[in-house]
Amino acid sequence: MIAAVDYEEAVEIQQLRLGVWKRLWRYTKPYRKDVVLLVLCGVSVALSGIATPLVEGMAIDDVAANGLDARFTLYAVLYFILVASAAIGIWAFIWLAGKIRTHVAHDIRRDGFDTLQRLPFAFFDQRPVGWLMARMTSDCERLSNILAWGVLDLAWGTTKLVAITITMLIINWKLAMAVLVVLPFLFWVSALFRRRILKTAREVRKTNSRITASYNECITGVRTTKTFRREQQNLGEFGGLSTEMYGSSVRNAVLSALYLPIVLTIGSVATAGALVWGGYDVRAGGITIGTLVVFLRYAQQFFEPIQELAHWFAEMQMAQASAERILDLIDTEPAIRDNEAVQQRMAAHVPQPGLAPDGYPNRLGKIEFRDIGFSYDTGGPILESFNLSVEPGTSVALVGATGGGKSTIVNLLCRFYEPTAGGLYLDGVEYRERSLEWLHSQLGVVLQQPHLFSGTLRDNIRYGRLDATDEEVTEAARLAGAVEFIEALKKGFDTQVGEGGVRLSTGQKQLLSFARAILARPQLLIMDEATSSVDTETEAKIQAGVERLLEDRTSFVIAHRLSTIRSADRILVIDRGKIVEQGDHRSLMAQRGRYWRLYTDQSLRDVTKGQGVWRDRRTEIE
Ligand SMILES: Nc1ncnc2c1ncn2[C@@H]1O[C@H](COP(=O)(O)OP(=O)(O)OP(=O)(O)O)[C@@H](O)[C@H]1O
Ligand SMILES: [Mg+2]
């Protein structure tokens, strides 16, 4: 199926809202000097362009009056100066605009990146990755272009229009009026066409990115497609996209082809008007041939700045939505962050042994969920008056049906989400009174779908604690049971992973992210289905390592494979956001309740699947 991936290009045309652009304009502030230079370049290039016809006019009149005695050298020198200054101006503005554009794009991206890193998970629940990427790449590109090149063209275009108008009025106001009548009309037609052309161009780009996206899906999902024999249907959907692309491409080509001749015709009407009227005047001796030439040249030159101004005006109208989206993103205040009091305490902090930067003891202590209620932004309540108290050093296992709320409970504990009612207390202090950074530095989290960054295996493990030595990295890998497979690789710890690197199995990735967590030496270790893709034998080895490591630390482990959590101090059976049973393995088995049923079911399944030695299993069950 071709998903409607939301990499969308904005095609809507909006009223210009100056506030948005003013706010964006602030991004050029650090480069004000360059912007001023850029504007000056634009103005000087425009002025030299206007002066050139004047020199030509003077030369023609001089030759007409004095024949070969005319001052040819003077005109040659003047002409050269004008052309040279225009060339230098053009070189300078290309350089300056490029520089400003790059800096501004960098600054906007940096702000966006910064915000994205600080935003809580809830933000990402509702926005697809593709959408966010498009904001930070194509939107950002478009806006920085408008800021740099738009300003240049605005300076150049307005100077040109104003200067030509004034010069014409000074030389001969009657003739000037004849040329200027077409001006509003030219503006109107230009604006109309520019907008339409841009709109169809956007449609082409939009369809194009959907085509790219469907190629992407086709390639990445090729296995699923083949197993479900969906090739024909996919091809049909792709055909639809392709036809759409054809339609908007043709519309774009037709409009572009029409635009230039129409504008040129209007321009020619002005030129012709000037020629006819001016011609009579020349005959009557009212003006010289030189003046007429100047007018003709100006009439032709009008067209370019109008076209450019119309282009940027349309571009800004179209980019309005991009601008708003980017600013919205950058201005989003993270919903989960340190409150005022914590920030003040952090600022006033003087390092003391045993104290965290937020002024409270560094140790994590007892963890208490007190009457916690929680619901995600998009749904009904998941937890209601949830209570749980965990002494430091306890290993807690959460088990139970899919969708029961196990991950939600640990997400709250990590403060990836905050409770909507009640409070979570660490050593008697509500965790929103503590610093977020401190809490996260005490956590080691291992998830079911571990993420590896591009880099070597060693870098990936060291992500847990950047100042760890190579020996510590190796030791962590050993405790995590990852050493065997790493050393079997040709380059060992220096093997590259990620895009273009070696492919690891999910189980191997889990072992690596496990080593990463071990290296961080957290006070609280959280594992959400962390070893689900590791074989039972490796898992047993990991557990031995972890048990030693976590002797005095608190851990929360979620596992579907119950054999792995048997040794936990406390096992909680979670169902629909409630603890329905708790105790250690032995007592829960003795109760013959939910846990017993789950456990025996699973063990029997394992036996029938031929996993494990059934004789052992049966004695365990009984
Ligand atoms: N990001 C989210 N946004 C909205 N609802 C969510 C989100 N994550 C989970 N839920 C909902 O919350 C409920 C509990 O989900 P949770 O992930 O905590 O279950 P779980 O016990 O971890 O399940 P599993 O064993 O399958 O991992 C589910 O009904 C789920 O649909
Ligand atoms: Mg889960």
Image (cartoon, rainbow, N blue to C red):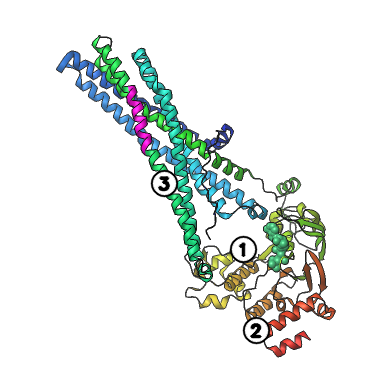
Secondary structure at badge 3 equals helix
The residues tagged by marks 2 and 1 sit, at their Cα atoms, a distance apart of: 41 Å
Residue 292 place in picture, x, y as percent: 28, 17
* Amino acid at pointer 2: Lys
Q: Label 1 belongs to which residue?
A: 465
The three-letter code of the residue at mark 3 reads Ser
Task: Give the CA separation, mark 3 to mark 2.
Answer: 58 Å
Is 267 magenta? The answer is yes
Question: Which sits earlier in the primary sequence, circle 3 or circle 2?
Answer: 3
Q: Is residue 68 left or right of residue 474?
A: left
- In the structure shown, which secondary structural element does the residue marked by tag 2 occupy? helix
Comparing labels 3 and 2, the label whose residue is closer to the camera: 3
Please say if 125 is above or below 397: above
**First along the sequence among labels 2 and 1:** 1
Q: Which mark is residue 249?
A: 3
Q: Which mark lies nearer to you, 3 or 1?
A: 3
Q: Residue at x 64, y 45 (%)?
A: 332
